[in-house]
């Protein structure tokens, strides 16, 4: 039986390597918030400028359908039929490159779902290239009822000059953040943006003598009257159904918060500007511009996101002390934001630059008191499965379930010839759990070695 889970890694860890094997070694339900900014399948190569802080960072965002992808797609048919069907449809509509990209994403999203706590959330950053297919994948993996928002981030706030005058389509100035929770009881704290100067002058045009505080006057009448259970009584000579009890109304009057413009006028309540939280942020985020080359925050990393974007996400969907995880951490903006906001954090990236950049950026924040992130290249070993029996004890059960047939060559053999094998090798994050075991004949088992089943089948088919 699984045991109560907690992270099986240290706070401030960055792994260098393929995030799939590393995530497979992470304990289930050990992360509070995931921000994932994966490649977008844009068919482009991104490189940081020479001389920038991120010089040397480069990745190719293009995908081909190799044999490993084909076999991983086949395995998805059992693990998540909905995701398998989405990928099949994408190939028919879009081609092999999209199919390969979605297989890459699907197997990783399954692991992200597993490592999230029941109260956790994920924000998947994407663009129009594959965003619609990724939403369907998330519906299949997290469940359509766990969809919370499709957030549109307007990364280009102004367009200058003659840009786009000869274009044959509208300018692409937005990205999408797909927000899903793992369960119904998830953490969310509504973010607020400051009021605009125009709104303040229009809505809070009253200025209190002496204090100079701006305020507006709002109605106190009870909508729906008696049918809504609002009390009826007289205030300053005016009888109405009110939204407050008589005691509460008397308290507001005693504090000078009830204003009557003239005798007989309906009293109204003061609301001060400095008591408001601002404007509740909606699903269109047009107040956080993308980084420009001259920005003090920019380090020249391709696809770098502004830290304000990550701070908004982290504040909205986590508490201080929670674990924030970024499986495609790149220049580590999410980790820097998490550190500023007193969250624990961990990230994965293929490049060793990620740990260099997070150390550099957090040192700038904290000063010399900051030590350094923990760099690892090995996958963690899961500790949340409890004490499992030796995996070879499953031999009789598997022989019966497989009806004596080798999973590899599909030939029936005597019991003595069959050997228990890990579908996902332990060296790549696999465990001794029953779901990760199968029977192979001794010949197939030797040929497979320490490869995954998808890797071995691809090699056998070559």
Image: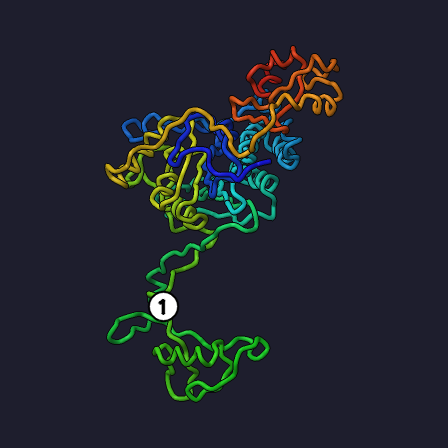
Residue that appears at 52% across and 50% down: 186
**Badge 1 element:** helix
Q: How many numbered markers are drawn?
A: 1
Can you see residue 317?
yes
Q: Quadrant of residue 367?
A: top left
**Is 2 left, or right, of 402 in this rendering?**
left
- In percent of width and height, residue 267 lies at 41, 81
Look at the image and name its color scheme: rainbow
Residue that appears at 76% across and 21% down: 403
Q: Is residue 287 above or below residue 261?
A: above
Disc 1: which residue? 202
Of 147 and 319, nearer the camera is 319
Q: Is residue 49 above or below residue 271?
A: above
Query: Which corner quadrant holds the N terminus?
Result: top right
- In percent of width and height, residue 60 lies at 44, 26
Query: Which corner quadrant holds the C terminus?
Result: top right
Of 407 and 232, nearer the camera is 407
**Is 227 left, or right, of 165 in this rendering?**
right
Q: Residues within 10 Å of mark 1 (few under 14, many from 20)?
A: few
Can you see residue 176?
no
Q: Is residue 223 above or below residue 76?
A: below
Of 378 and 179, nearer the camera is 378
- In percent of width and height, residue 244 lies at 47, 76
- In percent of width and height, residue 442 lies at 65, 12
Residue that appears at 30% across and 40% down: 297
């Amino acid at each position: 039986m699984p045991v109560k889970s907690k992270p099986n890694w240290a706070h401030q860890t960055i792994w260098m390597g393929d995030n799939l094997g590393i995530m497979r070694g992470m304990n289930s339900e050990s992360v509070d918030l995931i921000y994932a900014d994966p490649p977008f399948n844009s068919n482009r190569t991104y490189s940081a400028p020479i001389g920038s802080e991120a010089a040397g960072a480069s990745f190719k965002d293009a995908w081909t359908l190799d044999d490993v992808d084909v076999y991983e797609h086949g395995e998805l048919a059992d693990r998540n039929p909905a995701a398998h069907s989405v990928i099949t449809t994408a190939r028919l509509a879009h081609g092999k490159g999209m199919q390969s990209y979605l297989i890459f994403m699907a197997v990783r999203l399954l692991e992200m779902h597993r490592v999230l706590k029941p109260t956790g959330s994920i924000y998947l950053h994407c663009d129009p290239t594959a965003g619609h297919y990724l939403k369907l994948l998330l519906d299949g993996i997290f469940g359509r009822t766990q969809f919370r928002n499709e957030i549109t981030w307007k990364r280009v706030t102004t367009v200058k000059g003659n840009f786009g005058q000869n274009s044959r389509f509208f300018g692409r100035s937005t990205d999408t953040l797909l927000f899903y929770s793992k369960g119904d009881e998830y953490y969310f704290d509504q973010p607020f943006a400051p009021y605009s100067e125009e709104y303040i002058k229009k809505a809070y045009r009253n200025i209190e003598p002496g204090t100079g505080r701006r305020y507006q006057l709002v109605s106190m009448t009870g909508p729906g009257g008696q049918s809504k259970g609002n009390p009826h009584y007289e205030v300053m000579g005016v009888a109405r159904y009110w939204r407050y009890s008589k005691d509460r109304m008397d308290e507001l009057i005693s504090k000078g918060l009830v204003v009557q413009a003239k005798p007989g006028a309906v009293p109204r309540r003061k609301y001060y500007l400095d008591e408001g939280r601002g404007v509740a942020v909606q699903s269109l985020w047009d107040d956080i511009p993308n980084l420009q080359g001259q920005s003090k925050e920019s380090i020249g990393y391709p696809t770098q996101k502004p830290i304000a974007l990550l701070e908004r996400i982290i504040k909205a969907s986590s508490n201080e002390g929670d674990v924030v995880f970024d499986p495609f951490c790149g220049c580590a903006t999410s980790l820097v934001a998490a550190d500023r906001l007193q969250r624990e954090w961990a990230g994965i990236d293929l490049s060793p630059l990620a740990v260099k950049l997070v150390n550099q950026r957090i040192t700038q924040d904290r000063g010399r008191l900051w030590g350094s992130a923990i760099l690892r290249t090995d996958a963690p070993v899961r500790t949340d499965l409890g004490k499992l029996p030796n995996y070879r004890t499953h031999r009789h059960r598997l022989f019966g379930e497989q009806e004596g047939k080798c999973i590899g060559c599909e030939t029936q053999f005597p019991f003595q010839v069959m050997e228990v094998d890990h579908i996902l090798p332990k060296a790549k994050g696999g465990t001794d759990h029953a779901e990760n075991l199968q029977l192979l004949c001794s010949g197939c088992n030797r040929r497979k070695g320490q490869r995954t089943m998808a890797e071995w089948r691809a090699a056998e088919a070559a």
